[in-house]
Amino acid sequence: MAARPGPERGGEAVIAGPAVPSELIRHKRDGGILSAEELGTLVTGITDGSLSDAQAAAFAMAVYFQGMTWEECARFTQAMSRSGTVLDWSGTGLEGPIVDKHSTGGVGDTVSLIVAPLVAACGGLVPMISGHGLAHTGGTLDKLASIPGYQVTPSLDRFRSAVRQAGCAIVGASAELAPADRRLYAIRDVTATVDSIPLITASILAKKLAAGLDALVMDVKVGSGSFTGSVESAQALAESLVTVAADAGLRTVAWITDMNQVLGHDVGNALEVREAIDFLAGRRREIRLHAVTAALAREMLVLGGLARDHGEAAGPVEEALQSGAAAERFARMVVALGGPSDLLEHPYRYLASAPVQLAVTPSVTGVVGEIDVRQVGLALISLGGGRQRAGDAVDPRVGLSDMAGLGASVGPDRPLALIHARSMPEAERAAAMIREAMAVVDGPPEPVPPPVLQRIGPGA
């Protein structure tokens, strides 16, 4: 993990270098501190293309190894957020706080698809700008792209209209919103520079600042399926996000949640949309997914001024789920962004299925003692459900369903997962990866950590 933002290292002064990109990259590579002007030069180059892909990748790698100070990260973040249009919701006539949630990246994580309409049903306005998958983690936009007709990068006018109609809209950053991050995000994905705290911080907050939010709740994952394998790294990232957001005037709280097993039952884009729909419709609600979703939704209501505390927020959150109000908001959002009007009633009619299914049976009978969730994410990529190179097409049909969790009993008649693949050879290759990722042990299972671990932010 790269050095996290922090105080100036060793009393090192900020060195004003020439505004030549290669020299600025060299300066950062050698541990120097870049000024706001110099960072602005690099962001401009990323935005207008005058900084080549190779130079942008070199800058990302320099930051990966050298880190950034808090001040550098804040200035870089704000420059990224101003690289395009910054939304202003004050003249739209909408009533309610502008709040959002963002995850640092997980596997089988459908929380965004659930929490946005859930909070909208409770009176919040959720203009959620999300991203595609990064490395082994799934991307909310890739999930939504599996819905026929759904526009993941609509015009700003349609984005605003969807928020007016549904109270929420989950979209990607258009060419107008944080374009510098849009380009750097894709480069980081294929250059092993994803798991850098300053780059993660800047990427997330640039989009959120450009969205004109009043408040933000961060879901910082920790464990084998996250970019922050240790609790200490997750805490450092959470502190970075909260501190840099506060510097920009955005009220932010971070929750650290467990990613040592898949969140939910399914992994894969269309499969995860089906799971989110089932959750909203009350047909199937995995307990850990429910716990994380409810905690984040309660925090969003509190930060948005819709509830005094988590206790007061709990009632509206559960009522919106049980009454179907959250499901109805999701349906409105899908229609507003071009999707089918009866998706909730007939998800299997619209969400494509893979032609091959293969049960992954364990080599021994026992209980699941440990899961390498990163390997599960890589198995999805091997099936075609993620990207190995920038520009790769993603097959929304493929993935894994009915994943066994920690402590689950497995055997010949209780598989580890069900593979959904394009061909049998691809299914068998992914099955081998899943067997390797999931350790089956004899005897009673170890205690499973709770899904919601720690709150970091004001009043914590």
Image: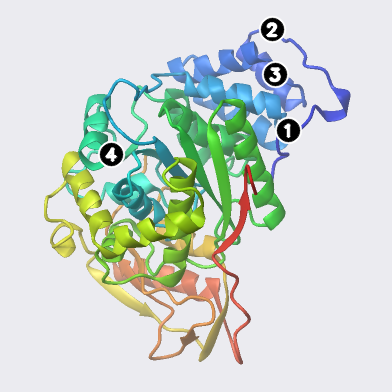
Neighbours of disc 3 within 10 Å: few (<14), some (14-19), many (20+)? many
- The residue where tag 2 is placed is 18
Neighbours of disc 1 within 10 Å: few (<14), some (14-19), many (20+)? many
Q: Is residue 239 visible?
A: yes
Task: Give whichever of 406, 357 is nearer the camera.
Answer: 406
- The quarter holding residue 157 reads top left
Disc 3 element: loop
Identify the residue shown where x is 64% and y is 35%. Answer: 243
Amino acid type for the residue under numbered disc 2? Pro
Amino acid type for the residue under numbered disc 3? Leu
Q: Mark 2 or mark 3, which is nearer the start of the sequence?
A: 2
Give the Cα distance between marks 2 and 4: 39 Å
Amino acid type for the residue under numbered disc 1? Gln
Give the Cα distance between marks 3 and 4: 35 Å
Nearest to the eye among marks 3 and 1: give it.
3
The disc placed on residue 66 is 1
Q: Mark 4 or mark 2, which is nearer the start of the sequence?
A: 2
Task: Give whichever of 272, 210 is nearer the camera.
Answer: 210
- The residue where tag 4 is placed is 152
Name the colouring of the figure. rainbow
